[in-house]
Image (tube, helix red, strand yellow):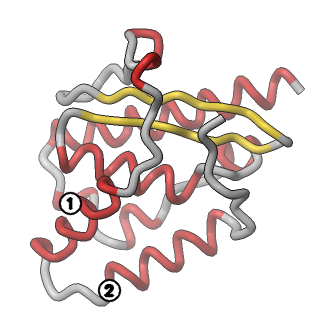
Amino acid sequence: MNETAINNKSIQEIENELIEDFSTFDNWTDKYEYIIDLGKNLPLIDPKYKIDEYKVTGCQSQVWLRPEFKDGRVYYFADSDAIITKGLIALLIKVLSGQKPEDVVNSDMAFIDKIGMREHLSPTRSNGLVSMISYMKNYAKSFLNKN
């Protein structure tokens, strides 16, 4: 399994760190560069999973998202053909991967509005962001229902 370390921080703690990180940038050019850097460090999905089964619909760019459930936590792996979108899914994975499914399902992802992300995305990217969050929560919900 290509997993990241267990995340000992709560979703809220990670969101607070991201809000603080984003507050250090003076403008959205710098914030986008940060998002792009997150994408470069994304735990990539194994190429064999870049199939329709793991493709996120509702994104203008191609996004593949695959969950894994281990030791009571859900891990996400993803990739995208677009650099900003790859950064956005990396941002979501930073917050939600390694968390308990019930915490993922109940997360409100309020940091997205607090950092001003939603208002700086094009409508198509904003729709894609909503789709990615929805997929992540639905995967977590399916793991929750199995246990």
Residue at position x 46%, y 28% in the image: 46
Q: Is residue 32 left or right of residue 134?
A: left
Whether residue 62 is situated above or below residue 106 in the rendered picture: above
Where disc 1 sits, the SS reads helix
Q: Which mark is residue 119?
A: 1
Instruction: Please rate how many residues cluster around mark 1, counting C-alpha atoms within 10 Å: few if below 14, some from 14 to 19, many from 20.
Output: few
Q: Quadrant of the N terminus?
A: top right
Q: Quadrant of the C terminus?
A: top right
Whether the residues at callouts 1 and 2 have beta carbons within 8 Å, the answer is: no
Image coordinates of residue 95 in percent, x first then y, are: 54, 58
Q: Is residue 9 left or right of residue 61?
A: right
Closer-to-camera residue (76/112)? 76
Residue at position x 16%, y 36% in the image: 124
Closer-to-camera residue (100/71)? 71
Residue at position x 71%, y 23% in the image: 142
Q: Quadrant of residue 69?
A: top right
Q: Nearer the viewer, mark 1 or mark 2?
A: 2
| Type of amino acid at the residue the image marks with label 2 | Ser
Where disc 2 sits, the SS reads helix
Whether residue 45 is situated above or below residue 49 in the rendered picture: below
Residue at position x 69%, y 40% in the image: 74
Image coordinates of residue 57 in percent, x first then y, are: 33, 20
Q: Is residue 110 left or right of residue 69?
A: left
Q: Which mark is residue 23?
A: 2
| Type of amino acid at the residue the image marks with label 1 | Glu
Q: Is residue 68 left or right of residue 109?
A: right
